[in-house]
Amino acid sequence: MTDPKSLLALETSPPCFSAEAAAAFARDIFGIDGPAKPLYGERDQNFRITPAQGPGIILKILSPTELESAVDFQTIVLDHIQAMDPSLPVPRVRRTLAGDAYAFVKDAADTPHMVRALDFQPGRVMDDVEPPPALLRDVGAQLARLDRALANVFHPGMGQKIVWDLRAIEILRPSAALIEPAQDRALVEAVLERFLAFRPHLDRLRHQPVHNDLHPGNMLVDADATRLTGMLDFGDMIHAPLIFDIAVTAAETVGTSLDPIAYATEIVAGYDAVNPLQPEEFGALFEAIIARHALAATIMAWRKQNDPEGAEKLAALAGIGIAAIQAFLAAGKERVVARFRAACASRPSAGLTARRFAVLGKGLELSYEEPVHLVYGQGAHLFAPDGTDYLDAYNNVPSVGHGNVRVADAISRQMHWMCTNTRYLHETVVAYAERLTATLPDGLSQVLFVNSGSEANDTAYRIAKAVTGKSGAIVISGAYHGITEISAALSPYHGPQAQPLEPYIEVLEVPDPFRGRFTEAAPYAADADRAIAALQAKGLGVAMLLVDSAFTAHGITAAPAGYFAAIAAKVREAGGLVVGDEVQSGFGRMGEAFWGFARHGVVPDMVTLGKPMANGHPTGAVVTRPEILEIFQRKIEFFSTFGGNPVSAAAALATLNVLQEEDLQGNAQRTGTALRAGIASLQGRFPLLADVRGAGLMTGVEIFEAGQPSRALAKRIANAMRRAQVLIGTEGPQGNVLKIRPPLPFNGADATRFLETLERVLAGL
Ligand code: PMP
């Protein structure tokens, strides 16, 4: 194993030429004539040469131990940056009068030293500046430009072994034993261990040449400290994970007016705007930032013991590291990553509510009394621009979780290739249709792709009409099935006053054992006889029955066992087709079964799909039997421009893969059952929770006040939950049912947070 000494020893004695000698070198070798002013240098002896005109140069006389290859390395890198991004504030390498990057001079003992020159860069060192947010953003942005410029340069010197490479932690770890006091030592050792455990993940991240030392001592800023004017010292460059560069700057660029995470957040956001980070890099950045602090503390401790003079030079670093590690760990990785990502995603959006109403219309209601502005999501969590974290217990569309990387990658990748329509051969749409139909009962084997649940229901009705030759349709009272002319007609959701029923539609009494007239299936099912007779009496006959088997719009009512099967049998007997609207209940949400209809012992003739199908990418479908589709396609030339396009198919396939591989149906079953048990356990203390029901991660909670359903109280609870950072909705014909329907990765910890928040909110009413 490498001896830490070989990495840690500081070269502390730069050469000692006189200022007169330096001025003579500048004049004779570089053709710059002016006085020489000595500057500090750790290894090189540095002079600023100021000629009568122009900004002048920094003349560097190198220690005799310095290798020519190291100077070549820096020259190649700086020339490359100059070529890639000429306005980046990095030093340019001045050539000698002979056109070389360096020359040799001799000291009194006849020892040769390399001498080289860089253009002088104006500005003051950032070290003694309290960096305002605008400067931090600029630092991030300029570092991002630097990394973009560095991406494709190569020199064997980038393989150098240096102590400030986070991957050297393994070698330095024993030196952490020297850290005092003991609690700091324990903290640093824990972070080092944590980074070593994380180490294998680094190998999967983007690698490239990185500066690796852009701390405030190596940055210059303008007079009012709003812009970076110089980036110095390319001596620690290595080939490493890209995030190392951000970690160094984000860890060390701190002041006293903000919390340490805020400084890092501004830098990361500035960086990402220029050189976008990849999703997995955010978490790695958290690890690298705390590891950088732990590494610095370890190096400090080693120097104190072995190299007191070197330690003094690093003394400024001491202290900030421990406090920063504590701040990052106290906030936790998830929250810090969320703050980073939210800051990267957010754009200034002053007056957004008013602007939105102005261009989208007043009628498009916003959820909650205090609207929620969201910029980033992960799993069942959503985040505001300032990083405020909401638990999402409402959204069913991102069924495999917000910001799902596999779905996002599938969409992006396919969009980069091409996106066209289903009239050309394409593997993905066929593969997806095969995979989808494999999850459905035998017979439901052909797929017609559309773009939404509304289109799917609209199309299902057209198919039913074409196949049966009838035109009557039966739906449940208060159901919601969509926004097109037909699917809206099939949606008596807004009530007969707002929307009179079309003559071809009959509605059935809601099978609701909690508030309805009966608790058994048979008397509810008998209503289908009446509806069928009515349609027949009008001479329309029955084309189809359409049922959302989660009974979502009705308040997630618990239809009595056998109800759906009974009405399906009656409709079939009358010659109609049975359509399962799986927009809400499909794709594993109900826990007990992958498809909602399966919980009711029914195999529909058609199913309609939408919302969760592609995790938010607009995709819908009708799945049916070949003999049904055959009749429809013979009669009607049906083609959807976007339906089943390769991007939608890729999104849907990725979604199905995640659903199955992560067993999200199983999670829905387990977590949903525990969640309802938890809510039910609050009923004793809070009798306003009149009924708790549902399946999987689809839950309805009936809210009563003074023995009556209360829309106002349900709204108050939803708004109070929102203020407590948990998102739910209200539903049902009287608007008094809490709708709790989270993304399927909603886990045990999320359920606990939900229950604790609900209890607090109810206690505070
Ligand atoms: N069917 C059901 C059961 C629904 O809940 C919805 C949407 N809420 C739709 C159909 C319509 O889907 P979309 O909004 O995608 O058109």
Image: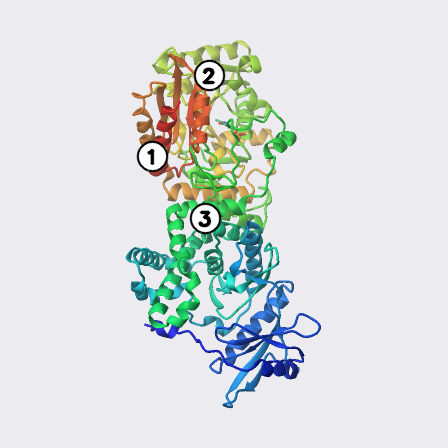
- The residue lying toward the viewer, choosing from 16 and 333, is 16
> In the structure shown, which secondary structural element does the residue marked by tag 1 occupy?
helix
Residue drawn 60% across and 71% down?
79
Q: Disc 1 marks which residue?
A: 752
Answer whether labels 1 and 3 touch (C-beta < 8 Å): no
| Dot placed on the residue nearer the N-terminal end, 1 or 2 | 2
Classed neighbour count for the residue bearing mark 2: other residues with Cα under 10 Å, few (<14), some (14–19), many (≥20): few
- Is 516 on the left or on the right of 429, as rendered? left
- Is 524 on the left or on the right of 268, as rendered? left
Q: Residue furthest right?
A: 53
Mark number for residue 734? 2
Q: Amino acid at mark 3?
A: Asp
Q: Disc 3 marks which residue?
A: 259
Q: Amino acid at mark 2?
A: Gln
Looking at the image, is 678 positioned above or below residue 139? above
Q: How many marks?
A: 3
Q: Position of residue 489 (x, y in %)?
A: 56, 20
Q: Quadrant of residue 443?
A: top left
Mark number for residue 524? none
Q: CA distance from mark 1 to mark 2?
A: 29 Å
Residue drawn 41% across and 23% down?
556
**Quadrant of the rendering where the C terminus is positioned:** top left
Classed neighbour count for the residue bearing mark 1: other residues with Cα under 10 Å, few (<14), some (14–19), many (≥20): some
Q: CA distance from mark 1 to mark 3?
A: 29 Å
